[in-house]
Image (cartoon, helix red, strand yellow):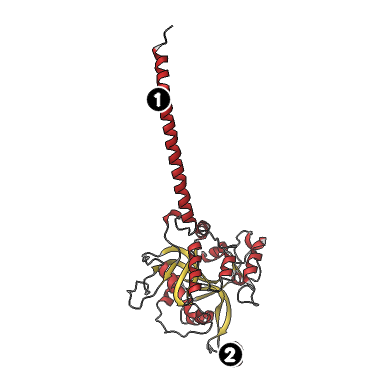
Amino acid sequence: MPSSPKFFHSRLSQPSNSRRSTVLILSCLLIGISGFIFGLTSFLTCSHTYRCLNNSPPRSVRVVWGTNTNKNDNGVGNALLLDGEERRERQKVMGFVGIQTGFGSSGRRRSLRKTWMPSDRQGLQRLEESTGLAFRFVIGRTNDKSKTAELKREIAEYDDFLLLDIEEQYSQLPYKTLAFFKAAYALFDSEFYVKADDDIYLRPDRLSTLLAKERAHSQTYLGCLKKGPVFTDPKLKWYEPLSYLLGKEYFLHAYGPIYALSADVVASLVALKENSFRMFSNEDVTIGAWILAMNVNHEDNRALCSPECTPSSIAVWDIPKCSGLCNPEARLLELHQQESCSKTPTMESDD
């Protein structure tokens, strides 16, 4: 019985379809392998620096003040990126937190990145988006090539620095603090600028709540306030008892580990001419003395200098034993393991 044309046609077409299927499978396989290799290469290239995420620009910025450069409307020089590209617009945030650090503090930064400050780019971005605060480690420069190379490696890995064109040394802290506020003002359009040290345990969510409060005064100096002498000799370490015995006037200023200045106050500092105000040996005394000349509201908040974690503590450090945490590298990790430090809900202080 002869085969039907339909059956005969199907038998003749089968080898041709098989070859086409084989070619199609091989093509898909090659495309898949190529895509996997490309993706793996991109991941390995980007994962080290976090800079391929959303094609975003570098977060670490080096600020250089040129003596002959054009000044912007804020009275400061142009801010330059690490690769030399000019940043034209200030980033809008509610608060900018500059974590003051040094070349000998890599261990502190390592501990911080294991606790309240995320070490990965995405985690830090989520924290900043949820709080409205931007965070950067702030450091100057050094002539030590090995330390500079080590810092560059850390920048490449974490990309969370603000680099100042000023020598990094303890005796230059007042100058560094002023340079920090000028750089922060040039880069960020912020309601508050926060100076914090790298040896305190911070609750960013609670700091955000504090800074977001409505205030009647546009010029605010916010910190854990103490009394200090108006007139001091920078060379004297014992000036407070001497000033007390001599009956000198005292004024309120914030403890150095953390304090915040509103945008209007920082704008006034930025407008200051170099060497127009006296520098004291302590940066907290220096800033406090300058603020005396302004119509600034002093806001005292003891949650910024709590010796232990509480439902309302914002910054925890070993006051008055240490200016910060004693043995901060270990203490930061210990505190973070405590539920009262890292896992309690945000609660506003009654202050």
The quadrant in which the N terminus is found is top left
Look at the image and tell me whether residue 62 can be seen: yes
Residue 77 lies, in percent from the top left, at: 37, 73
Relative placement, left or right, of 292 versus 79 is right
Judged from this view, the residue extending furthest toward the top is 1
Nearer to us in this view, 309 or 170 = 170
Establish if 5 lies above or below 75.
above
| Mark 1 neighbour density, 10 Å: few (under 14) some (14–19) many (20 or more) | few
Residue 72 sits in which quadrant? bottom left
SS of the residue at dot 1?
helix
C-alpha separation, residue under disc 2 versus residue under disc 1:
101 Å
Relative placement, left or right, of 303 versus 189 is right
The label on residue 16 is 1
The label on residue 243 is 2
Residue 158 lies, in percent from the top left, at: 51, 62
Relative placement, left or right, of 33 versus 323 is left
Question: Are discs 2 and 1 less than 8 Å apart at CB?
Answer: no
